[in-house]
Image (tube, helix red, strand yellow):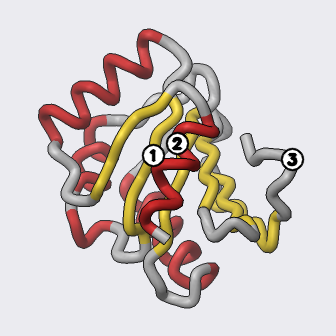
């Protein structure tokens, strides 16, 4: 998911999450199917993100692996402004109809309290996220 021209400065794993920071100033989050997502695991991820970005706000690009899907509790948690004080904006890559439906639901029902958009390409997402640097 991280473009080849981006140098990865640091990577941490908090199962089911793999979070990397690139030299382009963006965070890259991959959600795997390794274990089920929970609010507790998301809270641990937020702690790791804070440490990685020195407790500053940065834009986040997120992609779920095939068959990974955020449970309702995580969508409710993540939509809150205070759930992750270290992300200035969030872009989600959607590459299936199922994920598009989930994110449309997330945007319309959960109404995330941070700038949030979905994209079909990483480059479009990166271009939008860079406006938050």
Q: Are marks 1 and 2 in contact (CB under 8 Å)?
A: yes
CA gap between label 1 and label 2 equals: 6 Å
Q: Are marks 1 and 3 in contact (CB under 8 Å)?
A: no
Q: Nearer the viewer, residue 34 or 78?
A: 78
- Residue at the (26%, 55%) spot, across then down: 77
User: Going from the N terminus, do you reach mark 1 or mark 2 first?
Assistant: 1
- Front position among marks 1 and 2: 2
Q: Which residue is mark 2?
A: 125
Q: Secondary structure at mark 3?
A: loop
Of the 4 image quadrants, the one containing the N terminus is top right
Q: Which residue is mark 3?
A: 4
- Residue at the (27%, 59%) spot, across then down: 114
Q: Characterize the local packing of mark 2: few (<14), some (14-19) or many (20 or more) Cα atoms within 10 angstroms.
A: many
Q: Secondary structure at mark 2?
A: helix
CA gap between label 3 and label 2 equals: 15 Å
- Residue at the (70%, 62%) spot, across then down: 20
Residue 81 falls left or right of residue 32: left
Q: Secondary structure at mark 1?
A: strand
Tell me where residue 21 appears, x and y as whole percent.
69, 67
Q: Is 97 located above or below residue 122 in the figure?
A: above
User: Going from the N terminus, do you reach mark 3 or mark 2 first?
Assistant: 3
Q: Characterize the local packing of mark 3: few (<14), some (14-19) or many (20 or more) Cα atoms within 10 angstroms.
A: few
Q: In which quadrant of the rendered view does residue 35 lie?
A: top right
Q: Are marks 3 and 2 in contact (CB under 8 Å)?
A: no
- Residue at the (80%, 57%) spot, across then down: 6
Q: Is 106 located above or below residue 57 in the figure?
A: above
CA gap between label 1 and label 3 equals: 19 Å
Q: Characterize the local packing of mark 1: few (<14), some (14-19) or many (20 or more) Cα atoms within 10 angstroms.
A: many
Q: Nearer the viewer, residue 59 or 48?
A: 59
Tell me where residue 72 appears, x and y as whole percent.
27, 36
Residue 91: mark in rendering: 1
User: Going from the N terminus, do you reach mark 1 or mark 3 first?
Assistant: 3
């Amino acid at each position: 998911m991280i473009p080849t021209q981006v140098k990865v400065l640091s990577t941490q794993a908090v199962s089911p999450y793999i979070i990397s920071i690139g030299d382009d100033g963006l965070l890259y989050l991959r959600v795997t199917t390794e274990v089920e997502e929970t609010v507790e695991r998301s809270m641990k991820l937020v702690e790791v993100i804070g440490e990685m970005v020195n407790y500053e706000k940065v834009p986040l690009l997120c992609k779920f692996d095939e068959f990974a899907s955020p449970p309702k509790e995580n969508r409710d948690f993540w939509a809150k402004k205070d759930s992750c004080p270290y992300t200035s904006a969030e872009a989600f890559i959607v590459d299936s109809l199922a994920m598009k439906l989930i994110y449309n639901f997330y945007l319309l029902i959960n109404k995330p309290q941070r700038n949030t958009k979905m994209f079909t390409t990483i480059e479009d997402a990166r271009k939008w996220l860079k406006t938050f640097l």
